[in-house]
Amino acid sequence: MTFDINVLIGQWPAIVSGAGVTIMIWILGTIAAAVIGFLMAVARQYGGVLIDRALGAVVAVLRGTPFLIQIFLVYYGGPFVGLELDPLPAGLIGISVYGAAYFSEIFRSGFQAVPKGHIEAGECVGLTKGQIVRRILLPEMTMLVLPPSVNMVVILMKETAVLSIITVPELTATLSAIGSQQYAFVEALSALALFYWVLVEVTGWLGNLAETKLSRFRFFNA
């Protein structure tokens, strides 16, 4: 048995299509997760005790259960509550909700790390809660949350492979099918590993670049 890369070259249109679906779900899911997570963090910070506890319970459940089970519940359990989704939308929703739980904790930790004196100073000059978030919390927390946020982006990228379980036509499903049809499992899985490794390295490089560019805006405590 030899390693035959030509098996994959002959299937390049399907591979490119699968890679495109993977990247699309990853990017859209990450953006949605970050936005929802940020809104959850703000709600927990300023919404009162009841909202904080309710959202805290939701976050605990999402972080305490495997993503595989969550995506099964979204796709196969949806019809029980009248929610029938195709694989692609179900996968996108699953990634977004799963990531939102983690992003909310990242942003909440960033909020709490901002010195209280800065917030009190904003309140003293008459800033509203919205203005405090925009003018004080967001600028100061950006550097604090950037490294864990990049790590979360990488995690969500890898979790896209799980979506092959519900027949989302992403790269894992595509290469698995090619490996089964052509009896080229080693070639298919090697290409899949290389694809994710390249994405991880590029994401890490972009994260380091962003951190370097933003380092001049870092806030120091006296």
Image (spheres, rainbow, N blue to C red):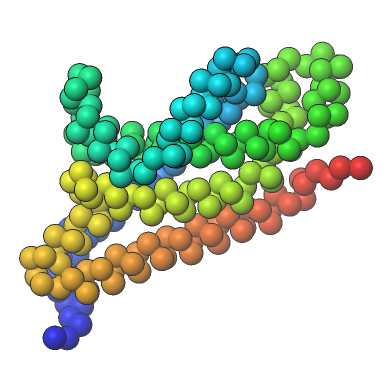
Q: Is residue 214 left or right of residue 101?
A: right
Q: Quadrant of the C terminus?
A: top right
For residue 179, side relative to residue 153 (left or right): left
Residue farthest toward the bottom in the current orientation of the protein:
2
Q: Where residue 191 appears, x then y in whole percent? A: 28, 69
- Considering every residue shown, the one lying at the far right of the view is 222
Residue at the (13%, 86%) spot, across then down: 1
- Measuring from the top left, give residue 16's x and y in whole percent: 24, 58
Residue 120 figure quarter: top right
Identify the residue shown where x is 41% and y is 44%.
27
Q: Is residue 60 visible?
A: yes
Tell me if 187 is positioned left or right of 69 in this view: left
Classify residue 207 by image quadrant. Answer: bottom right
Left or right: residue 88 compared with residue 125: left
Marker count (numbered): 0
Residue at x 25% of width, y 68% of height: 189
| 63 versus 192 height, above or below | above
User: Percent position (x, y) of residue 129?
Assistant: 70, 17
Say which of 94 and 139 sits in front.
94
Q: In this view of the protein, can residue 20 be seen by the observer?
A: no
Q: In front: 160, or 131?
A: 160
User: Residue at (61%, 58%) from the top-left corner?
Assistant: 208
On screen, residue 63 above or below 39: below
